[in-house]
Image: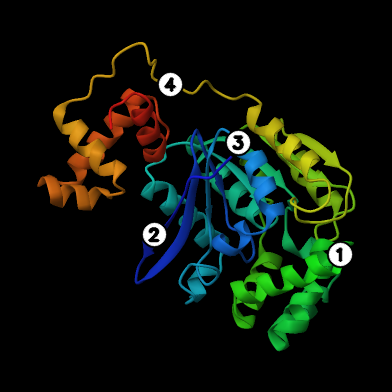
Amino acid sequence: MLDKSEIRFLPVGARRLAYEVRGDGPPLVAPAWWVSHLELDWQNPDVRQFWEGVAQGHTLIRYDRLGVGMSDREMHEGDLTLDGEVAMLRALLDELELDRVSLIGGSSGSCTATAFAATFPDRVDRLVLYGSYPHGEALTAPGVGDAIVAAVRAHWGLGSRMLSDIFLGSADATEHERFARLQRDSATAETAAELLSLVYRFDVREYLPRVRRPTTVVHRRDDRAVPYRLGREVAAAISGATFIPLQGQSHFPWHGDVDSVVRACRQGLASHAPPVPVADPREPVLLSRREREILGCVARGLGDREIAEQLQLSPHTVHRHVANIRRKLGAASRTAAVAQAARLGLV
């Protein structure tokens, strides 16, 4: 179970991006979907079932892109590019001091994950793509995408219900109403329309052949939002990628046969998994007095600058000590380091 959760905020200029760190273990990062809401999403039992299944044994990191959910709702034109999405993901990993992560990219988030893995291969262990596509123009017939965006911008109530029908397919009326309401709670009509237009503009065809990390592509055969053939094209363009076709028509992995999607995604995360160093509890972990002080501050949730001010050190020195602590504890993240230290009686 991923009961342990922290919602934090990453400063982006004068704005703040909301992200959640949940669970313990090697980091698994989910690039932002079209619209989302960290708090409201997790209240959906189907969403919880999916993420708890996929991320078992991992530290799951999700975030709301700028303009939606719990992030600041102000959105700039510069946010609406694939380069901007990749830069935001990189900034988040830097904030969390994560050198290498596994990425699970769903829907439009698969484009961000693909571009990041191709651009920064040394920072990615494994890549899992669900409901992915190589370029947005292939998602609909010519002109249809523009019509959908226009409908969302003109009448968010009708637009959200139309999108619910596309994404959820044969779900019952209660599910359709719940998702339509979630969309409206997560973003304004203008923001939703701008981000949907971005989804249709994404193009990762030049990145796909450059992905060199172990990759698994999962796609439902009758996906109503992203045609099955597009997932196959993604897998065919990535050298050595594994393609796992599944039955079903719902675009969201937490609807329909959730268990089959969880199994497929976990297969991708398990394949070629490098051993994760873990401190042997039979052997003492030797931390200096200063490292223990800093570890105690990390356990209280303090960031590097706050620790530096409290202990009268430079942020760079604190950062170096935290890296040493993580190395000695065999931890992939600050959160995992605190958990391991607690198990060893160091905090």
Residue 272 placement: quadrant: top right
Q: Which residue is mark 1?
A: 172
Circle number at residue 10: 2
Q: Amino acid at mark 2?
A: Leu
Mark 4, Cα crowd under 10 Å, few <14 / some 14-19 / many 20+, is: few
Verify CB contact (< 8 Å) between mark 1 and mark 2. Answer: no
Task: Tell which tag, 1 or 2, sits nearer the viewer.
Answer: 1
Circle number at residue 278: 4
Task: Answer yes or no: is residue 209 visible.
Answer: no
Verify CB contact (< 8 Å) between mark 2 and mark 3. Answer: no
Quadrant of image for the C terminus: top left
Question: For the point 36% across and 33% down, which residue is it?
Answer: 337
**Secondary structure of the residue carrying numbered label 3:** loop
Mark 2 or mark 3: which comes first in sequence?
2
Separation of residues labelled 1 and 3 (CA atoms) = 29 Å
Q: Nearer the viewer, residue 143 or 25?
A: 25
Separation of residues labelled 4 and 1 (CA atoms) = 45 Å
Residue 292 placement: quadrant: top left
Separation of residues labelled 2 and 3 (CA atoms) = 25 Å
Q: Nearer the viewer, residue 47 or 245?
A: 47
Question: For the point 84% across and 72% down, which residue is it?
Answer: 142
Q: Position of residue 144 (x, y in %)?
A: 83, 75
Circle number at residue 56: 3
Q: Left or right: 81 with respect to 343?
A: right
Question: For the point 61% across and 34% down, which residue is it?
Answer: 212
